[in-house]
């Protein structure tokens, strides 16, 4: 029903749960689903980017006050991260791509 109603009003599905007029799709979300690179900024933010040919994950402190203290002390609030294995990269690529299938 949702697909029919939104499409009838010029808002076709461009992802499993999102609709938009052609050309007005969310670039923000499409970056994730196309497995693009992004930097997460702010408490609890996650990032994914390629460094030295490998996909790197960053994780920022979740608690706003602690995050702000880290930014003041270190210049950033990143508290964790890792370089993904090729298998992990492939898994993420597949799962994100399913949103567009």
Image (tube, helix red, strand yellow):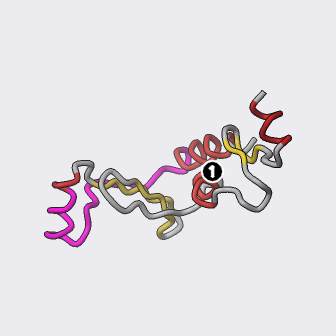
Q: Nearer the viewer, residue 24 or 85?
A: 24
Q: How many marks?
A: 1
> Which residue does the image show at 78% across and 34% down from the upper left?
3
Residue in the picture at 83% in, 49% down: 10
For the residue carrying disc 1, how many other residues have a C-alpha within 10 Å: few (<14), some (14-19), or many (20+)?
some
Image quarter in which the C terminus is found? top right
Q: Which quadrant of the figure has residue 80?
A: bottom left
Can you give x and y, in whole percent of width and height, for residue 92 in the image?
Answer: 56, 45
| Stretch in magenta | 67-87
Percent x, y for residue 78? 28, 60
| 91 displayed left or right of 46 | right
Residue designated by label 1: 33
- Which residue is more in the foreground, 37 or 82? 37
- Give yes or no for residue 86 being in the magenta stretch: yes
Residue most extreme to the front: 9
Q: Residue at x 53, y 67 (%)?
A: 53
The location of residue 77, given as percent across then percent down, is 25, 61
| SS class, disc 1 | helix
* Quarter of the N terminus within the rendering: top right
Write down the quadrant of residue 17 in the picture: top right
Q: Is residue 51 left or right of residue 87?
A: left
- Answer above or below: position of 97 versus 49: above
Task: Based on the picture, tell me whether residue 55 belongs to the magenta stretch.
Answer: no
């Amino acid at each position: 029903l949702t697909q029919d109603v939104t499409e009838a009003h010029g808002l076709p599905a461009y992802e499993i749960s999102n609709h938009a007029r052609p050309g007005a799709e969310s670039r923000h979300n499409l970056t994730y689903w196309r497995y693009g690179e992004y930097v997460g900024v702010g408490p609890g933010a996650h990032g994914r980017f390629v460094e030295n040919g490998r996909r790197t994950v960053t994780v920022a402190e979740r608690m706003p006050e602690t995050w702000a203290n880290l930014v003041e002390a270190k210049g950033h609030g990143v508290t964790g991260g890792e370089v993904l294995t090729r298998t992990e990269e492939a898994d993420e690529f597949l799962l994100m791509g399913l949103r567009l299938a």
